[in-house]
């Protein structure tokens, strides 16, 4: 009986002895069945946050064509900014007014040793920071998360943070960041291509340099205008208003613009000359 038991033990040891093939199967099994130990990864959290951005239901704006019926509601003000492609957030609405980097309030539980669950929430670390913008030439004071501030520092300033073209950055900006991005891009475009970049610079009677914005001919006389069209219209309006008042009529600035906004600069200067305006303040 003793010899039988020894042979049985030897057989059992041969079965349980690890071989290269067994080790390969064991390693593959470890890959197929990962450890039950909890892994602290932020990937799932990030995916959850992007889902809150990408899953918003955005109404499609209706485009009107010539000949369509007049809509019931007409906005009183012209649209200043293009629509944010991901819309405003219906949850954690304060993120619509700052740079929150697609961070939202998180909900979960505190689990005690007795397995008792206590409901709690985690809010982003929000701070107010003032950062200088080279493109806008002013200080921008806005709420942002500490994570966004770290990203801005890494990017090299708020201008580079706002103008980055990655799709993830557009999702991070939110409505407030989208508006800042639009203003910054418009300012950079205006700085690169000024309105009168090829205008001639001359000296006036006082020896000061002035820029000639328009060259017009009025009554056969060439004139060099040094003020813009908007300034010319604001100069002409009170004179036209006095003319209308002398005839017993009232002229509003809105009606004045409807008539004169499309007029050429030469026509406006000619009208000012007819009303005995001193042209020396607008020409050189």
Image (cartoon, rainbow, N blue to C red):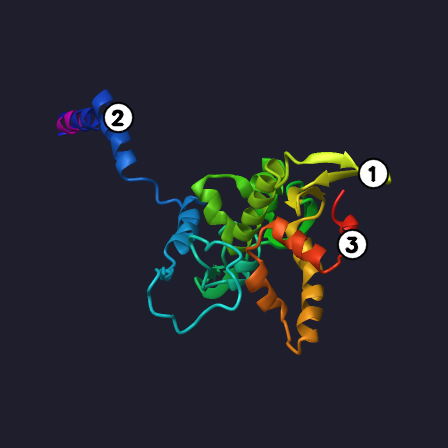
Residue sitting at x 72%, y 60%: 275
On the picture, is 207 further left or further right than 237?
Answer: right
Q: Is residue 94 magenta?
A: no
Quarter of the figure that contains the C terminus? top right
Q: Nearer the viewer, residue 156 or 117?
A: 156
Using the numbered discs, state the Cα–Cα distance from disc 2 to disc 1 in whole angstroms.
Answer: 89 Å
Among numbered discs 2 and 1, the one appearing first in the sequence: 2
Residue sitting at x 61%, y 52%: 267
Question: In the structure shown, which secondary structural element does the residue marked by tag 3 occupy?
Answer: loop
Q: Position of residue 276 (x, y in %)?
A: 75, 58
The residue tagged 1 is 208
Question: In the structure shown, which secondary structural element does the residue marked by tag 2 occupy?
Answer: helix
Among numbered discs 3 and 1, the one appearing first in the sequence: 1
Q: Position of residue 186 (x, y in %)?
A: 57, 45
Direction top: furthest residue = 20
Q: Residues within 10 Å of mark 1 (few under 14, many from 20)?
A: few
Q: Nearer the viewer, residue 165 or 107?
A: 165
Quarter of the figure that contains the N terminus? top left
Among numbered discs 3 and 2, the one appearing first in the sequence: 2
Question: In the structure shown, which secondary structural element does the residue marked by tag 1 occupy?
Answer: loop
Q: Residues within 10 Å of mark 3 (few under 14, many from 20)?
A: few
On the picture, is 130 further left or further right than 180?
Answer: right
The residue tagged 3 is 278
Task: Name the quadrant containing residue 155.
Answer: top right
Q: Position of residue 266 (x, y in %)?
A: 63, 49
The residue tagged 2 is 23
Judge depth for marks 2 and 1 and give the one in front: 1
On the picture, is 162 further left or further right than 13?
Answer: right
Read off the magenta span: 4-8
Q: Magenta part mainly helix, strand or loop?
A: helix
Direction front: furthest residue = 220
């Amino acid at each position: 009986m003793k010899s039988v038991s020894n042979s049985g033990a030897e057989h059992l040891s041969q079965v349980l002895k690890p071989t290269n093939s067994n080790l390969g199967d064991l390693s593959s099994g470890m890959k197929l069945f990962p450890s039950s130990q909890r892994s602290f990864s932020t990937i799932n959290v990030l995916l959850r946050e992007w889902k809150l951005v990408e899953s918003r239901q955005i109404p499609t704006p209706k485009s009107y064509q010539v000949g369509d019926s007049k809509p019931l509601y007409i906005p009183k003000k012209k649209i200043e900014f293009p629509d944010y492609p991901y819309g405003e957030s219906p949850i954690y609405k304060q993120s619509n007014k700052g740079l929150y980097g697609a961070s939202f309030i998180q909900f979960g539980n505190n689990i005690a040793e007795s397995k008792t669950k206590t409901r709690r929430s985690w809010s982003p670390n929000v701070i107010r920071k003032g950062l200088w913008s080279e493109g806008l030439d002013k200080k921008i004071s806005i709420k942002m998360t500490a994570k966004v501030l770290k990203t801005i520092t890494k990017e090299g300033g708020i201008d580079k943070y706002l103008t980055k073209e990655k799709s993830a950055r557009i999702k991070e900006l939110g409505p407030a960041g989208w508006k800042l991005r639009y203003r910054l891009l418009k300012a950079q475009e205006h700085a690169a291509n000024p309105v009168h970049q090829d205008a001639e610079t001359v000296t006036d009677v006082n020896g000061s340099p002035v820029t000639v914005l328009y060259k017009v001919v009025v009554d056969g006389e060439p004139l060099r205008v040094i003020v813009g069209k908007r300034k010319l219209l604001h100069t002409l309006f009170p004179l036209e208003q006095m003319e209308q008042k002398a005839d017993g009529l009232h002229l509003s600035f809105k009606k004045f613009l409807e008539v004169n906004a499309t007029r050429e600069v030469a026509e406006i200067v000619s009208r000012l000359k007819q009303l005995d305006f001193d042209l020396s303040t607008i020409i050189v």
